[in-house]
Amino acid sequence: MAGSRFIGELAKLVRPEIGWLGELAVDEANVVPSGGRLIPWMPLVDAHGVDRAYTWDGIGAPWFVQVKISGFTDDEGRHRWALRAGSFAAYDRFAVVLGIFHPKPPRIGEVFWRIDSRLIRKLARREYDAALRTDVYRLDASPTHQDRLAPYRLTRDELWKGFAPRGPLLATTRQTLPVLRIDMGGMYEFALFTELLRGNHKDLLLFRPAFDIKGRDLLVQLVGSPHALFLQIKGTAVRLGTDGIRFHLRRNTFVPADDFLCAFEFWDRRRASRFAESWLVPSVELARRTAHQRDAGYLTVDAHLDPSRDRWAEFRHPVEDQAEVLRRALHELRAVA
């Protein structure tokens, strides 16, 4: 009985974990719909009430952002947030992004609020919080009803637009997203990370390298076991003809192994959106199918958007099923061990 209660306590997400997931959700909401042009910057030290900075193409004037995720809903369905007054400073290009966390099932909601920091004092109530022993700015809002925060309410797909350049520049570049002269690798990685977190049943543990290493972008452990898989994440927006697409892997980053998969993501420039499916290919099988290639620098993977014409069709999956595909592969590893 005591053991069951202990497991239940472990399964409950606490505030720092919810806050971290909320920051990742905001990253995804900004990076993916912008075609990778809105670049997130993470502070090395958690201080001054800033959780992220975002720049357009990595060089534009930064927006600074504090992310607050609420896990509390009152009887009327309103969510509540508290910002420490002592560590909150209002200034230009500093915004507060509010979000909601649904505990059952655990997930970050599809609704956000984006508020200019200079409006917080007007929209919030300043009160003394006895538990925190400090003054706080209290905000509350409904995800559906009209209230004083309703003008700042946005869907996940709309959030990024508030951090993008305004005027003709946005109208021009939006039609041609993404621009492949910049590094889009982070966009594909964030997209995959988010799907794996979303599809997690508390049985997968994800690790990202602390520094950039060749050929391995993600390590996924089956919790409570030594079994794990490595992933290399590759993306493309390159089309061949009407519906063909092409991926390249550097040979010097590709070492096939039973515990190594390649994840391929496609950005559809014509629709300015991520393709609904991705490819998760075991590296050993990929090596076998490309053994005839003679390019000294790269391996080439040619896929087709039409599954009936795609020689890699057996490895393509809806993006929301990626966690389950890896889960099955990990259990297969355990079965043969």
Image: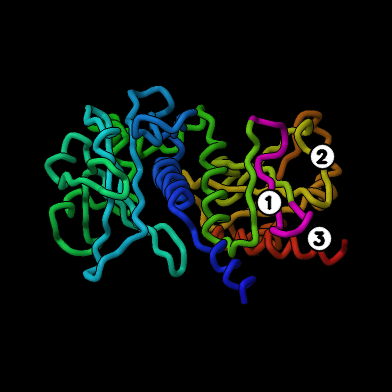
Three-letter amino acid code at disc 1? Val
Residue visible at 74% across and 61% down in the picture: 329
Three-letter amino acid code at disc 3? Leu
Q: Is residue 282 above or below residue 60?
A: below
Whichever of callouts 2 and 1 sits on the residue coming sooner in the sequence is 1
Residue pointed to by mark 2: 255
**Residue 219 among those drawn in magenta:** yes
- Helix, strand or loop under label 2: loop
Three-letter amino acid code at disc 2? Val
Residue pointed to by mark 3: 333
Splitting the image into 4 quarters, where does residue 335 fall?
bottom right
Q: Nearer the viewer, residue 251 or 11?
A: 11
Q: Is residue 101 above or below residue 113?
A: below
Q: Nearer the viewer, residue 316 or 196?
A: 196
Q: Is 141 on the left or on the right of 247, as rendered?
A: left
Q: Is 45 on the left or on the right of 149, as rendered?
A: right
Residue 323: image location, x then y, percent: 61, 60
Residue 265: image location, x then y, percent: 58, 48
Splitting the image into 4 quarters, where does residue 142 fall?
bottom left
| Number of the label disc, if any, that sits on residue 149 | none
Q: Is 144 on the left or on the right of 15, as rendered?
A: left
Image quarter hosting the N terminus: bottom right
Residue 17: image location, x then y, percent: 48, 51
Q: CA distance from mark 3 to mark 1?
A: 12 Å
| Badge 3 density bin: few <14, some 14–19, many ≥20, Cα 10 Å | some
Residue visible at 22% across and 31% down in the picture: 90
The stretch of residues the image draws in magenta is 211-228
Residue pointed to by mark 1: 220
Q: Nearer the viewer, mark 2 or mark 3?
A: 3
